[in-house]
Amino acid sequence: MLRRRCKCDNGAKYTRAGGFTLIELLVALAVFATMAAMAWGGLDSIARTRSVLASEQDDLRSLMHALGMLERDLRAAVARPVHGNYGEDVPALIGGSDKLEFTRLGFANPAAEQRSNLQRIVYALDGARLVRGSYAVLDRAPNTRAAMRPLRDRVGALRLRYLDAQQRWLGAWPAPTNDGPSAALPRAIEIRIEVQGYGEITRTVELVSDFPAKFGVAAP
């Protein structure tokens, strides 16, 4: 605000207050609005970037969790065949190109129940979803079903291969020409999984073949 000094006819001096003009106010408001919009746009961009990064981190964490669980389960695999729903013999590990079933060691038992510390595990591709299943018992009754839960969405493909004792990669296990015992495990399993946004991820998991001798795992 401007103040101007004036002199009256009688010689007295007084001060007259002068304000901003309408144009000056409009210009000031326009400048303020522009700066506020720029500041808000910058903050909104930062917030959206942080949200996208957080979402991507959560997505990557979910993928690593799923792959890590599969690898841990396989490293704990044991040569323990089971009985199927109708009493048939089921190999310790049976797998195809996109499905895998095996027995693993380390079934937690915090309640000290009267049951084995072994568990039958299933991994499969259900549509575009990687799922993991587990059986409450090893040797199943006719109505025994695996409890399935999703591990990862947006999976385009799951490809599994099995390394035998002759260092050959097979598309199924046990091999159709395998005359060995059903308790045998492959030397390693190659996992190839296609995930939207990440492409194809490959993992090779070596199985521990001496679990039966070390832990007394025996066939039923």
Image: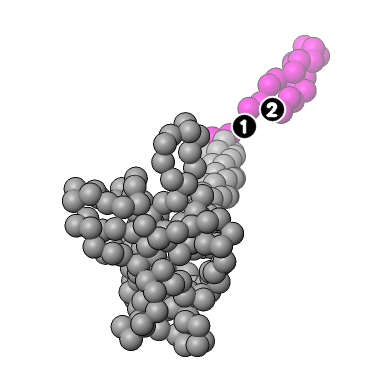
Q: Name the image quarter holding residue 125.
A: bottom left
Residue 1, which numbered label?
A: 2
x, y percent for residue 68:
53, 59
Q: Is residue 137 located in the magenta-colored stretch of the structure?
A: no
Range shown magenta: 1-22
The quadrant of the rendering that contains the C terminus is bottom left
Q: Does the magenta stretch include residue 17?
A: yes
**Relative horizontal placement of residue 104, taking residue 81 as reference (left or right):** right
**What colouring method underlies this structural image?**
one colour
Q: Which quarter of the picture shows residue 179? A: bottom left
Instruction: Give above or below for 219 relative to 202.
Output: above
Q: Which element type, helix, strand or loop, lies under badge 1?
A: loop
Find disc 1 in the rendering and name its residue.
20
Name the quadrant of the N terminus. top right
Task: Give the side of residue 47 with respect to residue 146, left or right.
Answer: right
Question: Residue sitting at 34 percent across and 45 percent down?
Answer: 136
What's the residue type where badge 2 is placed? Met
For mark 2, does the 10 Å Cα neighbourhood hold few (<14), some (14 to 19), or many (20 or more) residues? few
Q: Is residue 73 visible in the rendered structure shown here?
A: no
Asked if the residues shown at circle 1 and circle 2 are in contact, with their CB atoms under 8 angstroms apart, the answer is: yes
For mark 1, does the 10 Å Cα neighbourhood hold few (<14), some (14 to 19), or many (20 or more) residues?
A: few
